[in-house]
Amino acid sequence: MIRLLDQYDIEKTRHLFYLPNYMGVNVGDENTFFQSEKYVDLYHENFYCSYLSGLKNYKALGYFDSSGNITAFLSFYQSTDEPSWYGTQIRSKANKHVVRDLLDSAMDLNEADGRFKFYTLWSASQTKLLRRFAFSDRNNERYDYFDEHLVPAKHKCFYTSHWHVLFNRVLLPLDTVVRCTFLKQKYRSQLPLGGNI
């Protein structure tokens, strides 16, 4: 089962911050940025304060197994500056089919809200794996992408919304790529409403 997560799911998500790899880096390696208990506490707190506290534009979808445990989640931010959303985290102890189901649900939810493109941040060394791992056949056909820009390791992203939302204002220790994924024109039945009079 997939549903939007809320404040009652805070402790149920914590274990997903102890995964052995994050953005292609082994978090158990003591030479990495991601290795400490302090990092896990900080990132989990940042996640639940943003995505599980009822903020209007920050959402997380969780995948629940038959015992009611969260085995994966996908979080995203819905922009107020343009009709787009930002996929901010995927954390999973499950297989690629669960990740695909979560991404399909996020795409469907955002399409229903008139948001036909989204941005994601990926390790530059793993960008080719993304579509094979995370995209269902249906959405692999319906969506296309381009890589927007590269941010070298330990550098600040120049673009404000990407820096605040995708990077979380953290200098990452690896080269990263910001990707824009968009619904192809032939699958758009109408334009989203944008008037504000």
Image: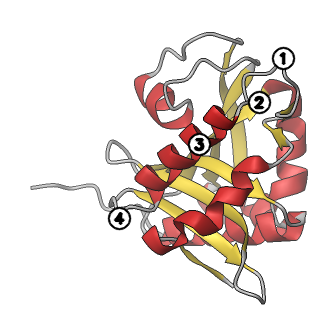
Write down the residue under mark 2: 35
Q: Is residue 103 above or below residue 84?
A: below
Q: Is residue 59 above or below residue 36?
A: below
Q: Residue at x 61, y 10 (%)?
A: 155
Real-space Cα separation, disc 4 to disc 2, in angstroms: 29 Å
Q: Counting residues from the N terminus, which is met first, the one under dot 3 or under dot 1? A: 1
Percent across and percent down for residue 25 are 85, 30
Do labels 2 and 1 touch, CB within 8 Å? Answer: yes
Q: Say which amino acid is labelled 3.
A: Asp
Residue 94's image quarter?
A: bottom right
Whether residue 188 appears in this view of the structure is no
- Foreground mark, 3 or 4, reads 3
Q: Residue at x 55, y 35 (%)?
A: 166
Q: Is residue 171 above or below residue 98?
A: above
| Residue at the outermost bottom position | 66
Write down the residue under mark 3: 41
Real-space Cα separation, disc 3 to disc 2, in angstroms: 11 Å
Do labels 3 and 1 touch, CB within 8 Å? Answer: no
Q: Which quadrant holds the C terminus?
A: bottom left
